Amino acid sequence: MILSFLWLFQIIFLDIFYEKSKVSDITFSASQIKRSYTEVNDDLTKTLDDISTYKGICIQVIYNNEFVYDSSSLNRGCISRANISEYQKFFVNSLLDEATYKVVNPRFDNKVLLKALKLDDSTLVFLSSSIEPLDNAIKILQKQLIIITIVVLILSFAVAYFISKRISKPIEDITKSAKQLSTGNYDIKFTINDDIYELKELVNTLNDAAEELNKTEVLRRELLANVSHDLKTPLTMIKAYAEMVRDITYKDKEKREENLNVIIEESDRLNALVNDILDLSIIQSGNINLNIEDFNFYELLDSIINHYKIYDCKFTLNCDKEAIIKADKMRLEQVMYNLINNAINYSDDNKEITINVIDKKKFYRVEVIDNGKGIKEEDLKLIFKKYYKVDKTHRRDKVGTGIGLSIVENIFKEHKFNFGVNSKVGEGTTFYFEVPKGNL
């Protein structure tokens, strides 16, 4: 593009620029002559000589129809006195004080720019400058531009080749590694030996992506294992106890009722799992509509705790009975059930659960604390993942479906609550969130 602009302005528009430059020069010279003529202390003859000599402009001064100054002997291409006389008549008849003409000089058959100027009623000045054909200059410029174009293009291709080889080689290596990543090899490590900042950033990003994909793959396998176990176990038990009722205990009322109760419990467990999966899907799809309202938080917590009497848990609730919060009541109830279920699952045998609702002026900080074995630091950032379990073993006495904390996280994000988890191995775990105060 730069070369194209050079050719455009140096060759095609050169004549136009040259002519405009000449017009500008001759107009400026005319103003200098006018100023010198009006200034008492100015030497008009010196001004005329300087303009004629240094700017290559022909000047002829006529006073009372007589030539009193003529620089035509100093400059090639000046219009002769005879021809000037013809233009003098034309200019005088025009009654103008100043005029510019483009004429052909019969003397050399060249184009001339002629400026006529009336200093007073008896003094006329004619300035002329040849607009020489620039064909020779253009040919010289063309030859120079051809050489410059060839040299620049060769250098450009050489530099482009060098840069492309330097960049394309590491990109090819990255592409090969990326192909392995696409086949499921998430242990691949992307490396680069060049100091190219953008490629280093790309390699770091791909390594982070590979690490996350590896974690996702591990979680996917665990999810399949957990879901298959959590679905298969209740289905197996439902089938087994149904067959037992059908074939064995259908006549024994007590045994039959016991077996049917197991079937109902396992159906409830299966139904809870399916409902949690549906809830999580709805929340993650963004189709959840929050019904934000003000309500008494103590009453909600007290009601939830009463539902856990059958689990032989010891609850400690530290909450102002007049604590009013602003949130979606149904979703926050779902949050508290999931957090309490998680606390029960990971408490020690005493199952002591503490719920603190701390007044922080503009909001309440809610803490759900268990006295379990705690969570390792590397597991904390994964605790809200679906089906992620700190304890990988399956226990039938655990409450919940394994995706409760993922539901909790998504509800918090929908509410834009600040939340998190603190834990120390051997000392228990604290889940917390901050909920704005309401007004009732």
Image: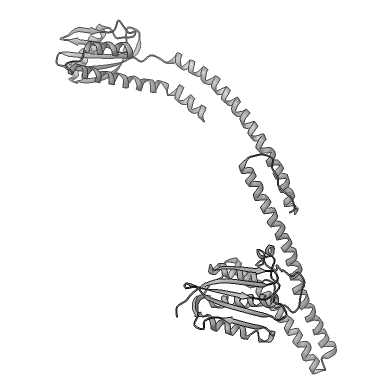
Image point (68%, 41%), residue name: 171
Residue 424 drawn at (x, y percent): 67, 69
Q: Residue 348, located in which quarter of the rendered image?
A: bottom right
Residue lying farthest to the top in this orientation: 73
Q: Residue at x 59, y 28 (%)?
A: 156
Image position, residue 396 (x, y; %)? 76, 78
- Can the viewer see residue 289 in this picture? no
Task: Name the residue nearer the viewer: 370 or 130.
Answer: 370
Instruction: Provide residue 18's location: percent of width, then percent of height.
Output: 38, 20
- Dividing the picture into quadrants, the one containing residue 229 is bottom right
Position of residue 177 relative to residue 227, above or below, is above
Residue 124 shown left or right of residue 251 in the figure = left
Q: Is residue 246 visible?
A: yes
In this image, 263 relative to 144: left or right?
right
The correct choice, above or below, for 77 with respect to 250 in the image is above
Residue 36 against residue 407 in the figure, above or below: above
410, 380: nearer the viewer: 380
237 with respect to 359 (left or right): right
